[in-house]
Image (cartoon, grey):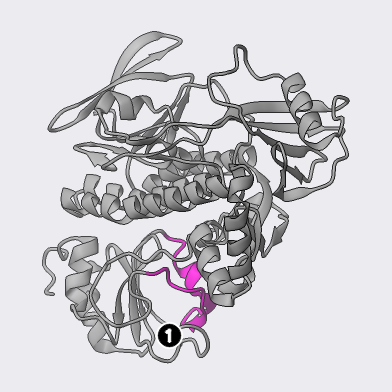
Amino acid sequence: MDAAVIVVGAGPTGLMLAGELKLAGADVIVLERREGPAGQSRGLGFTSRTMEIFDQRGLLPRFGPMVTGDTGHFAGIPLDFGVLGAVHRAAKTVPQSQTEAVLTDRALELGADLRRGTEVTDVVAGDEEVEVVVRDAAGAGRLRAAYVVGTDGGRSTVRRSAGFAFPGTGSTREMMLADVRGIDVAPRMTGERLPGGTVMAAPLPDGTTRLVVIEHGTHPGDRAAPLTYDDVVAAWKRLTGEDISHGEPVWLSAFGDAARQVTRYAKGRVLLAGDAAHIHLAAGGQGMNVGVQDALNLGWKLAAVTRGHCPATLLDSYHDERHPVGERVLLNTRAQGHLILGDDAVQPLWNVLAELTRYPDVQRHLAAMVSGSEIRYDLAAGSHPLLGRRLPHWETTTANGATSTTALLRTGRGLLLDLAGSAVLGARAAAWTHRVDLVTAVGPTTGEAAGATSAVLVRPDGHVAWAAPGTHQGLTWALERWFGPPRAGRNK
């Protein structure tokens, strides 16, 4: 085989996945049809959950200074994301091109094989391997891997070649996006509903302004030629009365509001992540963030299987955990789409929802939904409040000095955090120390579950798989479930 895993697509999802695979010791080839980085920035900024993930992998310093804040919206209705009490605020203006550059550098530093200018034309899956048919400057060729992951976007060749079902709804409206230099328009960060449609304007740090224009009555497929800046200028003028013809467009894009999700995230030895698995309206900037989180969930599992640490059945948990997350994203983006893009008939519904957001519980619920902070996987039965959730950021002290739970997860390994100095805990985990770090630390005194937790077992993606007291299954059950059989020669 040419690699344990071939990842098709070098956007944020594919690059994050490549880094996670290499961090866990798996060989990976990344294939990208473009000769170089796209340079476009459809995705803009990170949710607080993605900020946590990048911090967990030590990546935040690579982005440099970022504009962050607690303000957000649901269908243009302002929300205070500060009610979530997250350790990180959302980043507002990080262009996708910068995200791709950071994740590219990381993947290459870890040893990923990135092959640009290589187009995948077909995927042929067998019982023991997957064959990828490619075309590059040298001509046609074939590559083989134990697994292939399609991260090649909404028009995924991998998804189509492997025969994944992709049900949902097609686009009903056209939206125009343009990054423009040299214009001075009022910021409309959460959008402004106007009689003829909706407009958004977001100033970016480099002096560019991002415009989104959605005109009532426009439909995908109506356009006879590619989108031009003149089209954007004319639509902006019709909706706002403002003239932006003197601006200099950096890039343009037309997109729709299709909402689709594959029925299964895995089909034999072929898996999908990011937009290849789910597409939806770009409401709240969730798409790229969800793709990065797909990659974090899948990477360590796929590496564990290809390296022989865990049985292939571990990969079932990828679909089981991430498909419901994708469903929730489609649910909330479709709801937002009706409210943002609808005509005057939806205004009463928008007004009622705006009234409801005055209640803190409603603010918290919607903010958690859009940011991904509500995610809780079904990892074990029990009453402990952290089971299935991400481990909070706790400042703590170990034998090596002051640290944090975030820093302890940067190795990409499992973590058994002993907060009570238990000799029994260490003895039970001894057969898994080749894949799990056993760390004794001083327990936190403040925060969720502080003082009521004596130990937690944390997966490489940061989710708590076992906690004491309050998990019905034993520690050895959880260790074997997520990290494979005990090392030979060790007793459980």
The image quarter containing residue 241 is top right
| Residue nearest the observer in this picture, 5 or 120 | 120
Residue 4 in the image, given as x and y percentages of width and height: 27, 37
Q: Is residue 315 left or right of residue 376?
A: left
Which SS class for mark 1? loop
Q: Which residue: 43% across, 83% down?
A: 441
Q: Is residue 441 left or right of residue 354?
A: left
What's drawn in magenta, residue-wise?
389-411
In the rendered image, residue 408 lying in the magenta stretch gets the answer yes
Residue 124 in the image, given as x and y percentages of width and height: 22, 23
Q: Is residue 247 above or below residue 14?
A: above
| Residue 111 in sight | no
The image quarter containing residue 51 is bottom right
In the rendered image, residue 421 lying in the magenta stretch gets the answer no
Q: Amino acid at mark 1?
A: Ala
| Total count of labels | 1
Q: Which residue: 13% across, 71% down?
A: 490
| Residue 222 in sight | yes
| Residue nearest the observer in this picture, 175 or 53 | 175
| Residue nearest the observer in this picture, 61 or 321 | 321
Residue 134 in the image, given as x and y percentages of width and height: 35, 17
Residue behind mark 1:
449
Mark 1 Cα within 10 Å, few/some/many (few <14, many 20+)?
A: some
